[in-house]
Image (cartoon, rainbow, N blue to C red):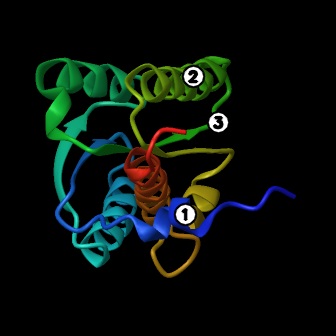
Amino acid sequence: MVETPRSRQAEDAPLAGVRILIVESRYYEEIAAMLLDGATRALDAASSAYEVITVPGALEIPQAIAIVLDAERETYAGVVALGCVIRGDTGHYDIVAGESARALMDISVAYSLPLGNGILTVNTEEQALERAQVARLDKGGGAAEAALAVLGLKRAMWREPAQ
């Protein structure tokens, strides 16, 4: 196990006041509302500012993020993607789930952007509700916390002098 020097741990980097972009899909309205509630609670707890952009579905989330970043790259310190894909009777689920995740990872790496992926990929609506509810698994809050954790690490790394 590799020890991480205390000076580089994510929690050491102050995140109050950072601006986070939330891009959400409202395809499943009730689930989307729960995911957004969890994400905004987590960002409020960290005293982070945020803006919300809504798109029709999960495949549009990466597109919207890329468009906003190209227009306002320096505006946001991180991004939270929120949505839900529920398996149906066709192969469309596999395309939407896989391609949205791949595109989010591509954006995160290309832009060196802390990004929390809160797009649920589930078999049933019941599974989605369990994961979305703040009082249950709170995956919206988890996605926001993941983005903040990576942002903390990024800021800690930038503070370190070059070796």
Question: What distance separates the C-alpha of mark 3 from that of mark 2?
Answer: 18 Å
Report the front residue among 160 and 137. 160
Mark 1 or 2, nearer chain start: 1
Q: Residue at x 87, y 58 (%)?
A: 1
Question: What distance separates the C-alpha of mark 3 from that of mark 1?
Answer: 38 Å
Mark 3 or 2, nearer chain start: 3
Q: Which mark is residue 87?
A: 3
Q: Residue at x 47, y 39 (%)?
A: 162
Q: Which mark is residue 9?
A: 1
| Up/down of 111 relative to 44, above or below | above
State which quadrant residue 46 falls in.
Answer: bottom left
Q: Is 124 on the left-hand or right-hand side of 16?
A: right
| Amino acid type, mark 3 | Arg
Q: Residue at x 18, y 55 (%)?
A: 50
| Up/down of 81 relative to 127, above or below | above
- How many labels, in total? 3
Q: Secondary structure at mark 2?
A: helix
Pointer 2: what residue? 102
Q: Which mark is residue 41?
A: none
| Amino acid type, mark 2 | Arg
Q: Is 128 on the left-hand or right-hand side of 22?
A: right
Q: Secondary structure at mark 3?
A: loop
